[in-house]
Image (cartoon, rainbow, N blue to C red):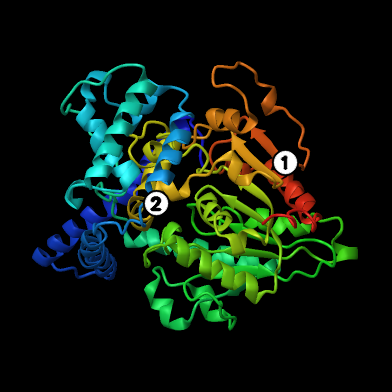
Amino acid sequence: MIGTSVPEYIFIRISTFALRAITPLSVFYVAFSIADPPSSSLRKAALAWATVEAGFYLLVFFPRKRQLQSPAQHPLPLDREERQELWSKCAGNIPEPEAYLSKWFLGAKAQEIARGNVREWLRWAMFGKGDADGKLAEEDEEELEGYVDGVEVVMGRKLDAGMGSAKSLRLTVDEVKMLHRPFLWYMIVGLVDTLTAGYLWYNGFKLHRTPMRQWLGVFPWRLCCLFTSRISPASNLNYWSRPHTSKTRLPVLFIHGISMGLYSYAQFLAEITKHDPLGPEDGEIGIIAIEILPISFRITSPVLAKQEMVRQISDIIHAHGWDKFVLASHSYGSVITTHLLQTPHVARMIGPVVFIDPVTFMLQLPDVAYNFTARPPRGANEHQLYYFASTDMMVAHTLARNFFWSENILWKEDVAGRDVTVSLGGRDLIVDTEIVGKYLAGVGWESEDQEWKKRDWTGSGLDLLWFPTCDHAQVFERKEGRKRLGDVVRAYAERREVGDELP
């Protein structure tokens, strides 16, 4: 993630403008060349490239954009008791009620949000229903009205009757907002993927690929898959692994976030064992790094549903003979971590957990959804996030059609009894880390106490690591940040007995 300086702003604006200009310029050049056919080799080469770019937009992006607007397949709704418990937890953890409601309504003013607007929003949030899903059952309608009354209690005021002019953010029923990427961009992604693969191979990692029949279903096509015979036991998940040779310590499962695959994490993963003082005498800590291609800036099939993702990761773990492991994840990876923790037969194998820039704590607040999908970009880092991540075709589809907040949210009590470290950046542009940190540290919303940011890491119970000058994912770009996280992972790996008593 880049910073917020003026030079960085100029750089990112020029970069995004240049990439976005390629396709319209290509279409113009093809049309121009029809009227004035090229004669020189240079113009013929330019026409060939322009034809590829124009064809890529018309034959790939345009039809796929329409296809990806299909309605989300919502999970089975919670039962009434579960909904009421969820609502009670959410309503009891809203630091700034007015800002909370305004941001869920895309920054609308209080007078623009009426009772009907809140009812429509809660119909989606609590029941997973959009406008086209028909009426709720009578008892559900009564329950819904109770939640609207609950919003008035939280706000400390009555809402106007009827519908106001505000529009709510309803992630899984709103339009999937995506922007075209030129063919050249995907060639850059393919190059970075190949270089990352080379770096991981050099550092002892081996790729386990899905069957070759799926190779053409991922674009850009992955050259690294042509040079390995190792087949993943999971039919839809590639992963990289280093053998676990340690006699006394736990291996590590790593799940990445929205990024260009493992590019942002490769150095961190390599340093876990490179800086391991016990390696020569005890053997190396094994690592499995799962690849989630739909959030890796590629054109591919949609992300796996919760149950299927958990099943396939479980198959990978069992194939390597692991019975317990340290689980580390970054950003969107915390969603999958949450699902693993919610699955009893997998949760029993999970020892200590490391969350880095997690998005699942305090997910009832609008910050993650709004900042990633709806915020108009202003600073350099926001423009980078908007173009290269938020509006990427498959990332946008993952968040708009496969991100269900009620099954992704994680509470402190869900990790009670475990050794857990949560790493937060003080300048995170996606997560309100001040609020998340206070929630996890047990500090009141109005408290001015900053001591929780300076607490020593104990390795027991819930620990926080605070990086005051880090934006989202920047901890992986800094040597001291990677070292601190690596030290935590290695310390956790030494605790084979931790979590044995968990159900």
- For disc 1, the marked residue is 461
Secondary structure of the residue carrying tag 2 is loop
Q: Residues within 10 Å of mark 1 (few under 14, many from 20)?
A: few
**Residue 442's image quarter?**
top right
Looking at this view, is 314 or 151 the one in front? 151
Q: Are marks 2 and 1 in contact (CB under 8 Å)?
A: no
**Residue 271's image quarter?**
bottom right
Secondary structure of the residue carrying tag 1 is loop
In the depicted structure, whether residue 456 falls above or below residue 35: above
Q: In the image, is 486 to the left or to the right of 145?
A: right
Q: Residues within 10 Å of mark 2 (few under 14, many from 20)?
A: many
User: Which kind of residue does numbered mark 1 sit on?
Assistant: Gly
User: Which kind of residue does numbered mark 2 sit on?
Assistant: Phe
- For disc 2, the marked residue is 403
Quarter the C terminus occupies: bottom right
Disc nearer the start of the sequence (2/1): 2
Q: x, y percentage for residue 325?
A: 70, 61
| Residue in the picture at 49% in, 62% down | 292
| Residue in the picture at 77% in, 32% down | 456
Q: x, y percentage for residue 32?
A: 13, 60
